[in-house]
Structure formats: structure tokens, C-alpha cells
Image (tube, grey):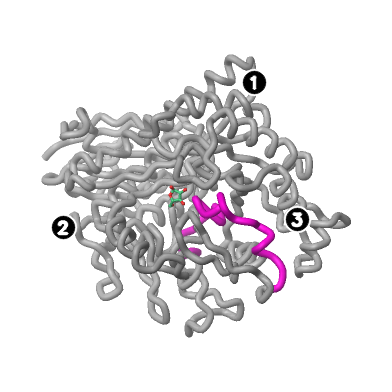
Amino acid sequence: MKKATIIIDKDFLVDQIDRRLYGSLLEHLGRAIYNGIYEPGHPLANTDGFRTDVIELVKMLNVSVLRYPGGNFVSGFNWEDSVGPKELRPRRLDLSWATTETNEVGLHEFCRWAKTVGAEMMYAINLGTRGIDAARNIVEYANHPSGSYWSDLRIKYGESQPLGIKLWCLGNEMDGDWQIGHHTAYEYGRLANEAAKVMKWVDPSIEVVACGSSHTDMPTFGVWEREVLEQCYDNIDYISLHRYYDNESDDTPSFLAKSMDMESFIHTVSSICDAVGGTKKSKKKIHLSFDEWNVWYHSKEQDRKIKTLDKWGRALPLLEDVYNFEDALLCGSMLLALLRNADRVKIACLAQLVNAIAPIMTRPKGSVWKQTIFWPFYHTALFGHGKSLQVMVQTPFYDCKEYERVPIVDAAAVENDNGEIVLFAVNRDMQEGIELTADLRGYHVSQVQEHIVLHCDDVKAANTECNPDRVEPVRVADGQIDGGKLQIRLPALSWNVIRLSQIG
Ligand code: AHR
């Protein structure tokens, strides 16, 4: 059997893990909001019309931050449409997804829902069709206590206390020509700078995220980041990264290696931030907000059909990817890349949360179930907090069509707030299990508390409404501590969570 070794050392930390690493995007798109989290008339809906079975699963997932209301949706959205009496809110054409937005769920309703599920809000403003004026007004509406036009309007509409939104996105994917109000890097950088400046004048406690590239294949990738940062470095706190992967070529070894691309994306953008900071002689460090990441491709053909059949419909089943086992493995590796870079990536959002490219699926009037990708997110959000530890992995490699020297074992480690050492590992080998030795230097580990494995013999197996538990984690009783070292077996093609308790 193949062998691998992981060395970690108590003194070698990456950084404290920001809890906002386990965020999610929830957009007014498809059935994410309408007939997703919100379905008045469903037998399990609460008095506000939100499904309690969905709330329970979102809570289980421990989502820390919710990026809202988009996505592409924000670039044509008037936030004022989403407040005030529901019956007076306008129905609008949403040009980004060619659907109709009814505004039944608005800012107040969503903030209450976010509170119920225990998540912080990350609000994206419209810098496509709107600008500085709308930006400063919504900060005043949401965060100013009282005594001004917008804050008093919020009070009139039922919220006497500020909504307290601390995290704001300055638009969405403004480098893309698919975006309503797409800008050049210079135009956007100037606009983001001015918007950030006045938003912080209204509420100096907020943090803001400028748009980076939509993905690494954009022709402007790299230059966009540099030019934007040159304009807004002093007034922003984070720059965003977005990345979706696919397996259109049905090449599992290459697909599973794509998290390497994600990690090099993180390193490249960090370097650009530091280069711009260096030329500005700035002491400030810009951190990263990886606020859209996932696998996305299964639903694209179906979406093309829906769009031609039902233009301007409401709650259309858009982006309803059915995720399989290999998708869960790649999502696991993407989470590992985020953990290993916890010194730089402070915010990350799985895109998205319910129905649209989501870990949670619902049937209108029916049940709710967990997709395969639910599981690695669930495990890392539950156990992957505290300190991210540096991992030295000595592993065999493989070559595939798209990459050379892909590590068979992909790993990250944390010392969490409960004093546990938790190793997360993906075995990318399609045929063989691997004997793993973990040398836990400086730790006095007493026992393997739990070894959780997500594995399935069929990489294309999915969880569906009829068979919701097809791909599910199991506990395995194996692993031993010998002379301070852990010996454990990672099955072929598997996601592993190994919880170790310390003596004393
Ligand atoms: O998450 C789906 C879409 O992907 C988002 O609306 C957009 O920001 C990205 O292109």
C-alpha cells in the first residue's frame, strides 16, 4: 500500500482561522429565495413564510456569513424596492437572470432570517446601475441609529435598532461584460474608492470588499486587480476572488486536482496586493474574500432551455446542479486550500446555499435534502476553527491530462477551540488506500477520537429526493497513536476528518 507522512508542529501556525471562512452566497436567483428558503404555505413554514426545515439544515451547516442579495442580481437592483410594506413593493424585471423579482423577501425579512440561522450579513451594493449616492443611503438606512431621513425610514418600517451590517461588497464581478454596468478597471477602481470612502464616513466601523477578477481565465486577470487596487487601496479592506470548476471533459484525476489552481489563484492575488501596497509604501495589508467558490456545470444545458421557455418567470429552477461524489471531494480540497491560506483569506462564501448550485435542495410543498457537497463544508465549519497549522505533506504524486505532480494526499490541520487537533485529508487516488503517518510535533495526543470518512464506489453517485443518503459520511474505527505518531488508513478516493484529543 502507498504511504504518506504529514508533519505538523505546535509552534508553526498559519494563523487564527476567521469564522467568516465558512460563509455562503444566497442570491435572488432561481429557487434560492422563492420556493427555497421562503415558501409561505409550505406545511413547515413559520409565520414569516420561511421554511423551518431549511432553517434547521442551514443551522446545521454553521454558515457564518451570508453574502446577499447577489451575485449578478445586485447590478440592476434598487435596494429601496426591498423595504417598506410588502404590498407596495414593485415587481421588477431582473435582467441578470431574465426573471421577475417580486421583492416579497426584502432587507428586513432577510436580516431576520440571517439572525435566525446565526449568520452575519455581507451586503453587496449595486455599482452597476447605481453609485455613491445609493451606497451611502443604504449604509445610513441599515446602520445609522436614528435622527436622519434614511435611519428614521428604517424605524418607520419596523426596525428601531440598526441592522448592524458590518461587511459590504462594492458591487459584483465588475470586470465581466455579462455584468449590468460593466466597468473598466480604472473606472471601477475610482468608483469603488469613492463609494467606500463615503460609506465609511456614514459608518466608520464597516469593512468593504472590492471586486477582483471573476475568474483566472479572464483576459484582464491580474491587471484588473493591480489597476483597481491602485485606485482604492487606502479605502478598502478586502479584494474578492471567484472560482467555479467543472468536469465537462469527464476526467476525474484532472478535476480533483483543480484545487491546486485555486491555491495558486490565492497566492497570485496576495502577491499583487502586496506589490501595490509596496509601491504605495503602505503598511496596510489587503486581505482576501473568496466570496464565490464551488463546482458549477451540471445545470448549464437545462438553464439554456429554461431561459428560452420561460423568460421573465418567477422562482425558475435555475442553476440546479445535482452534485455527485467527485464534486464533494473537490469541494473538500477547495476548503483545505482556504484553511491552508487562513492568514490571507479571511472571508469565503460557498456559492450558493439553497437550490441554486447549492448544498441544500428543496421540493416545493415537499422535502429538503443534503447534496454531496454538504458534507465537507459541514465538517470543516464544525471542526475547522481555532488555529490553522502548517502541514508538511510527504506524499506520492500523480500526473494527469491537465496537471503534473498532483499530491495524492491533500491535507490541512487545525488546533481547534476545544483543544482537539483535527486533520482533514483527501485521498485523490482512485484505486488505492494510503497508509498515513502523522508526526504531531509538540503535541501530546492521547487518542483518535473519531475518524469520519466520506467515500462512495461510484464517483458519479448523487443524493436525490428519492435517495437522499446515497453519499453519506461514516465513522470508522481505525487509527492508532504510537510513540506520539498517528497511523491511519485513508481509503481510496475519500474525504477524511480525523479528530485527535490531547492529554490533559
Ligand atoms: O453564483 C452564480 C453567479 O456566478 C453569481 O451571480 C455571479 O456573481 C457569478 O458569475
Q: How crowded is mark 3: few (under 14 residues within 10 Å), some or many (20 or more)?
A: many
Q: Which amino acid does label 1 sit on?
A: Lys
Q: For the residues marked 3 and 1, what is the alpha-carbon distance in whole angstroms?
A: 33 Å
Q: Which label sits in the foreground, 2 or 3?
A: 3
Q: Give the range drawn in magenta.
A: 58-85
Q: For the residues marked 2 and 3, what is the alpha-carbon distance in whole angstroms?
A: 51 Å
| CB within 8 Å, label 3 to label 1 | no
- Where is residue 179 shown, x and y percent of the image? 49, 45
Where disc 3 sits, the SS reads helix
Give the residue drawn at x 52%, y 54%. 73
Q: How crowded is mark 1: few (under 14 residues within 10 Å), some or many (20 or more)?
A: few
Q: Residues within 10 Å of mark 2 (few under 14, many from 20)?
A: few
The label on residue 283 is: 1
Residue 180 vs residue 7, the one in the foreground: 180
- Where is residue 200 shown, x and y percent of the image? 74, 40
Where disc 2 sits, the SS reads loop
| CB within 8 Å, label 2 to label 3 | no
Q: Mark 3 points at which residue?
A: 141
